Amino acid sequence: MFWTDILAFARGPFFRVALWVFVGGMAYRLVRIIFLGWPADKVPRRGSKLWGALKSFLKGILVWPFIPWVKNTFNCNPVVYLAGGLFHLGLFVILILGTAHMLVWKSLLGFGWKTLPFPIVDWMAAITIAAIVILFINRLIHPVLKLISGPGEWLNLLFVFLPMVSGYVMAHHLWFRYEVIFSIHMIAVNILMIWIPFSRISHFMFYFFSKAIHGADFGKRAVEP
Amino acid sequence: MEKQIVLNTFLKETGGHIAAQLEACTRCGMCAEACHFYQATGNPEFSPVWKIELLKRAYEQRFTLAGKIRLAVGLAKPISEEEISHFSKIVYEACTMCNKCSMVCPMGIQLGPLIHEVRQGLSNAGVVPAELLAAVNQQVEEGSPLGVTDAVYKSRLEWVADEWEVALPQDVKGADTLVVFSSIELMKFPENIAAIAKILHAAGEKWTLSSQAREVVNFGFYEGNPERTIMFLKRIFDGAGDLGVRKIVVTECGHAYDALRWTSYNLMAVPQGIEITHIVGLVGDYVRTGRITLKKGAHNDGRITFHDACKIQRRGGHIKEPREILNVLAPDSFAEMSPSREQAICCGGGGGVIAIKDADSNRYAAFELKVDQLRRVGAKTVVMSCSNCRLQFTDCVQHFNLDIKVAGLCQMVADALEK
Ligand code: HEM
Ligand code: SF4
Ligand code: SF4
């Protein structure tokens, strides 16, 4: 009965605590940034800031997950471009369009939606895991990435890797008893949720700030962002 | 001591605007390949994200909970005095603040302006390359980093007026437009001054020069020093105020345009009702509205291409005007380099880099990317709208022994004016 108890804990109180740390932590960081003060921009504009910001988001989203259209970006960074893009694509597909995760959303939000067939989600998961491994190797060998990576960057990859792999193993009923692997998956998810507010994975929130700043800065000069 | 000043500057300058961008960085490293200095040398310390390392660390360790904890348990490295001098060489000698990196960054972080903040911290602490500082001091004392004193200014203009037979109206009260040249034009490209004067006359502009506002270059801005940036800007605004002009025209200098047009308003009280524009914007308007007409196809000397200056095109927005002009002057022989326009590769000489001897190897290495671009487009002539770029091009064309003519856009326009 040992694992059943652990599973109950990981899905119950631990999950709720992790969720609150995640929500509370991100809210704290959001509020802090907003209250750090934003001096008004008094420069007369040549073009529209709003339009620039809009274009900047569209250019980041329409072609490939979040990576902007600039000549040679792909040629210069094929690994990050492909592996990073596939990783995010996979992540969002699994989290939103996987049946099991949709049911979690349903229990939290009260409504559900249509999901993708299992084989598609399953392949996405495999690709996502491979992408994380590739990003990890790339970070190990690329001179710039080596220079700019601290403990936080390695932990980021570890903490997104664990829920992915445990989820995959669980979905394929490999090696472990169901309660065991489900417990591991839930613990890994909880750790990730707790980790996010303390790490750079919180970029998904600041993305909206920095992309808007970029677009506005180019827009006001009447330059394509 | 220096460390403390740098830290204090960073803490004072970091508001939500900067913090949000520092927080957004995912450490993906994509910006590295956008930077001509990294591309040319492969030195990981030249990656844009590394150039803001000090700012980022100061922010994390002083503002964020996670950063404070990491510092306390020894997981984060505090900023040291040695690092401050080390980074001074990187941010002054291997960055032109061209901001190309911000276009490639998937998060859209404005790395150029953030690197400017780093320079500000270093400059407050006085950790600035000696040659750059010498030029700044010369501008404080003589009014120009190139030794253009009042006397030199006067005699030089007299000579230009004589040599090219142009009128150079000075200190005309009630003129519409104040034109401010850079000392680079005055000393190195005097034909540019004559060219601009000819264009303004042809357009019937009521313009003037000012003996008070006689230097548009702002070495305080290169240095990142707010007091000196403001001091040099104020000389221009005071001159404009005394003459009562409605418009200030920045001539062929990019950094000066960035300082005057896009930065001054957030730094100081700028006199109301004065429009600031760049000569390329003005000439573009003349051509569009027919205030001047140009001989079609005046350029017939083989393939010609345009070099976009970071601060006039990407950061200034005057991207269409040069194309419109060149499509009149060289409809058949004009071709774009790749990449161009807002995505153009910087010449490698801006941001004060060309003023620092120790940066020469970086500067030449970066220019090799330009050589490659010029070769691919098969250019016989390369034209540009910034004299600082032109200084770099002229020097590098010699250094690399290229058979390419370096030209200024205003000069081409002046030569093609329909009488
Ligand atoms: C609006 C949402 C998001 C945007 C715009 C975004 C964008 C990016 C970008 C541009 C990168 C760098 C390039 C790359 O490796 O692909 C990145 C890296 C990363 N993202 Fe996201 N992301 C978002 C959401 C998320 C979420 C929800 C997670 C995880 C739970 C996540 C985890 C990561 C990780 C771990 C990396 C680092 C990869 C590495 O170390 O190489 N991202 N993100
Ligand atoms: S602003 Fe230009 S020179 Fe400076 S780091 Fe960015 S790309 Fe390199
Ligand atoms: S490209 Fe942007 S997000 Fe990536 S490391 Fe450079 S600054 Fe950070």
Image (cartoon, coloured by chain):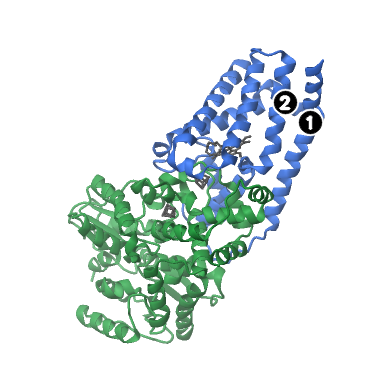
Q: Which residue is mark 2?
A: A186
Q: Position of residue B6 (x, y in %)?
A: 55, 64
Of all chains, the one bearing label 1 is: A
- Residue A10, above or below B234: above
Residues at marks 2 and 1, CA–CA distance in whole angstroms: 9 Å
Q: Residues within 10 Å of mark 1 (few under 14, many from 20)?
A: some
Q: Residue at x 64, y 44 (%)?
A: A205
Q: Is residue B313 above or below residue B141?
A: above
> Percent from the top left, x then y, of residue B303?
21, 51
What residue lies at 81% left-to-right and 27% top-to-bottom?
A12
Q: Quadrant of residue B16?
A: bottom right
The residue under the point 50% across, 39% down is A67
User: Is A28 on the left-hand or right-hand side of A169?
Assistant: right
Label 1 beta carbon less than 8 Å to ligand 1: no
What secondary structure is found at the residue carrying circle 1? helix
Amino acid at the residue labelled 2: Met
Quarter placement of the C terminus of chain B: bottom left
Q: Earlier in the sequence, mark 2 or mark 1?
A: 1
Tell me residue B386's x, y (percent). Answer: 34, 64
Ligand 1 falls in which quarter?
A: top right
The residue that label 1 is drawn on is A14
Task: Please name the amino acid that badge 1 sits on.
Answer: Phe
Q: Are marks 2 and 1 in contact (CB under 8 Å)?
A: yes
| Ligand 1 has an atom within 8 Å of the beta carbon of the residue at disc 2 | no
Which residue occupies the foreground of this view, B213 or B137?
B137
Whether labels 2 and 1 belong to a single chain: the reply is: yes
In the figure, what tint was chain A given?
A: blue
| Pick the front one: A100 or B127 | B127
Front residue of A19 and B192:
A19
The colour of chain B is green
Quarter of the picture holding the N terminus of chain B: bottom right
Q: Secondary structure at mark 2?
A: helix
